[in-house]
Image (tube, rainbow, N blue to C red):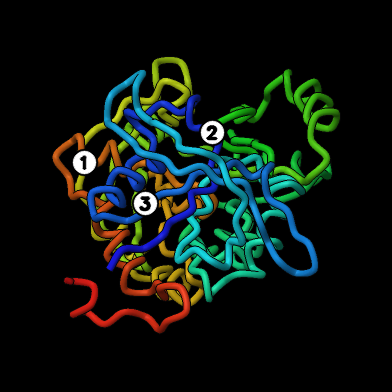
Amino acid sequence: MTLTVAVQMDPIERIRIAGDSTFGLMLEAQARGHALLYYTPDRLSMRDGRVTTLVEPVEVRDVEGDHFSLGAPRRIDLAEVDVVLMRQEPPFDMGYVTATHLLERIHPQTLVVNNPTEVRNAPEKLFVTSFPHLMPPTLITRDKAEIEAFRREFGDVVMKPLHGHGGAAVVRIAREDPNFGSLYDLFSTLFKEPWVVQRFLPQVSEGDKRIILVDGVAMGAVNRVPAANDIRSNMVRGGAAQATDLTPREREICETIGPELKRRGLIFVGIDVIDGNLTEINVTCPTGIRAIKKLGGPDLAAAIWDVIEAKARPTGGEPRSSAQRRA
């Protein structure tokens, strides 16, 4: 039995397929015989409680520069599909929040991955503070005096916007940094939300580990090493991917947070760990599965689809039995 899968994502012509986890999920879904429909978030509409969108059937190929073909567009009711992958990139702004409100109208009858209510309720740099014993010392504020007191206590710190993404606007501030006043003024102008201030972890130079949890279980990881003269390890910022294994401390972190991720319906999650310190829990559009596979790790797209197939309700029916899933 095949599933009809609608993929809500950024424009497909702009993605970099070599490291794009959404594309990896699409390749795996297509290989399993599922029907793929593509749309961007700006196409969503709701009228009288019905959530509709303009979709295009899509075929994908792992060929750079020739990675997709689209069919004729048509407007559909998203309640008619089996699965929606909510995979647009942040920023986590009111547009993103509104998309979660719309998609929760169809979930769980149509399985939305990740659960849109919990995506909205788990902003990545706030949700992680539910586990303070796993984190470095962390302050969330816009108050200059609070930041200065935090710096006096911990010395060098990292400051970043609360709803930032991809390593943008992440800065290291030294204990006696003369640039702090100017950076504070700049952040005050650019960002309306509070900021995250964390004790700087020097071991970031050895890597910031991205660990993928599938339905609450750690299944693979990649170590991202910052480029020279940069503290940001994000691969879009020049970080280099390295094969890695989990340490006992990292397994402890995953076992601690895993049950809560599963309870919330957060099937595909990427966490960031530096020197045994949990720094972020990424639930909006996690990345890393293609890098892990290329480095000889497990095929996590397959693991994610195993879970989705077990949870999905084919339109008008109940969750499929294991025998049905094998058919």
- Identify the residue shown where x is 55% and y is 59%: 128
- Tell me which label, 2 or 1, sits earlier in the chain: 2
Query: In terms of secondary structure, where does tag 1 sit?
Result: helix
Instruction: Please name which of the two marks, 1 or 3, marks the residue nearer to the observer.
Output: 1
Name the quadrant of the N terminus: bottom left
Location of residue 18 in the rendering, given as x and y in whole percent from the top left corner = 32, 28
Name the quadrant of the C terminus: bottom left
Query: Image check: 98 left or right of 20?
Result: right
Q: Name the foreground residue: 219 vs 55.
A: 55
Residue, disc 2: 166
For badge 3, the amino acid type reads Gly
- Identify the residue shown where x is 67% and y is 44%: 43
Q: CA distance from mark 2 to mark 3?
A: 21 Å
Quadrant in the picture for residue 89: top right
Query: In terms of secondary structure, where does tag 2 sit?
Result: loop
Residue, disc 1: 293
Whether residues under marks 2 and 1 lie with C-beta atoms below 8 angstroms apart, the answer is no
Query: Image check: 280 left or right of 224?
Result: right
Residue, disc 3: 276
For badge 2, the amino acid type reads Gly
